[in-house]
Image (cartoon, rainbow, N blue to C red):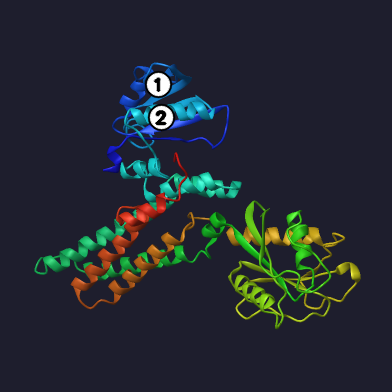
Amino acid sequence: MADADTIFAVASGAGQAAVAVMRLTGPGASHLVAGLCGGCPPPRLASLRRLRDGRGETLDQALVLWLPGPRSYTGEDSAELHLHGGMSVIDGVSERLQELGGRPAEPGEFTRRAFLHGRMDLLQAEAVADLIAAETAAQRRQAIRQLGGALGRIYQGWADRLLHLLAQQEALIDFPDEHLPTGTESAMLAEAASLQQEIFRHLSDDRRGERLREGLVFAIAGAPNVGKSTLINALAGREVAIVAPRPGTTRDVLEARVLLAGVPVTLLDTAGLRETDDPVEAEGVRRARARTRAADLVIEMREGFGEEVLPDGAARRLVVASKADLGLAAPGADMRVSAVTGMGMERLRAALEGIARELTASSGPPPLTRARHRAALTDAAAALAQALKADMPELRGEDLRRALADLGRITGHVGAEEVLGSIFAQFCIGK
């Protein structure tokens, strides 16, 4: 079994550094530490030790932390080696650990072991990955909240209620002749309906948590030569797109990552929307329409009396009249800007920041953060709906069991091996 191995990995960043932290965990951790420095230091006390290879040659002087299980990150015997950050040191220590029977860890293997040993549920494990990837304070706060178990407590509460409902339903099936309290079945159905409505309310969050974790997408769209490329350059503060007076310069979708109100936003500069016989430009227009429909916000650029050219089904729009420095009329526009002179740009940026905050703001219970959670909760709500419609107690009991299993998929209490593999493969080495 993989968890019978003792694994190791550098947990600090790649490349040369003053200090490199190497972690190791597994049933043979004490053997590996002893083979490196002659014995395990006192638990949880940073000790300066000389690390040696198999011939007794010094590899490094390092701080060694011995962390016996179960009071460790993974729940197993573990250790940390705080090495000097040179590649020769890291390579030498790695080679010695392999000689002693250790093996390099795979991505996410430390956190997977923590999950398998009950140190955290699957929601908390995913929060670890989100915390590592967090670009902004808002993303960090959301990940820490989830890591603290806030979401898990909600779902566990629902699971406990479902388990109670299932027990009542099984009693009605197995002991029909017993004198169960009057109204047991009607109370059970009312509780199932209440639980279903709570799940529906939790799902009706407009994807705020997922949007914050993944970042928003704002597409700049409009007819050719209305100033889309000039605007993305101004908002990004760098030359993202080529600007030229000839219409149709932008053929593909260009991207720029910016922060707006602490929310990561990907700005898209799209091809001008028009009918064309040029096959390359036509493909650019097709991609522009597709990305515009999928965006969280479309910044619709118009020049003067320019007509609306966005396709039906486009996302929320902010209509911006470009080239305001030329004094063009702007009927129907939300605001006028000139990306060349800066006129109106502060107001536009403030509007975009407000929309970013609105699309990701969350109050009350912690929001969903992943499509995997949403799919499982949707299935659980559907199973409860079937239970409420079931005309046979046995069928209702099966639907309640299915809803309980769907909730278990989120926290990892019920889950297929390939699902776990997919989740932990997204982690970095050493975590």
Q: Is residue 219 above or below residue 123?
A: below
Position of the C terminus by quadrant: top left
Give SS at disc 2: helix
> Which residue is painted at 78% across and 58% down in the image?
234
Give the percent coordinates (x, y) of residue 344.
82, 62
User: In the structure shown, which secondary structural element does the residue marked by tag 1 occupy?
Assistant: loop
Nearer the observer, 146 or 16? 16
Q: Quadrant of residue 97 in the image?
A: top left
Instruction: Please report the residue visible at 41 percent of the width from the left and 19 percent of the height from the top.
Output: 52
Whole-number angstrom distance, CA of label 1 to CA of label 2: 9 Å
What residue is pinned by disc 2? 95
- The residue sitting at the left extreme is 177
- What amino acid is found at the position of numbered circle 2 in the picture? Glu
Q: Position of residue 78 (x, y in %)?
A: 36, 30
Q: Residue at x 24, y 71 (%)?
A: 396
Sequence order check, earlier mark of 1 and 2: 1
Q: Quadrant of the N terminus?
A: top left
Please identify the quarter of the rendering in which residue 57 is found.
Answer: top left
Please give the residue where the numbered disc 1 appears in the rendered image: 53
Name the residue: 18% across, 71% down: 394
Count up the numbered dots: 2
Q: Which of 359/315 is in front?
A: 315
- One can see residue 362 in this view: no
Contact? badges 1 and 2 (CB < 8 Å): yes
Question: Please, is residue 219 above or below residue 430 in the view?
Answer: below
Vertical placement of residue 430 versus 361, above or below = above
Label 1 sits on what residue type? Answer: Asp
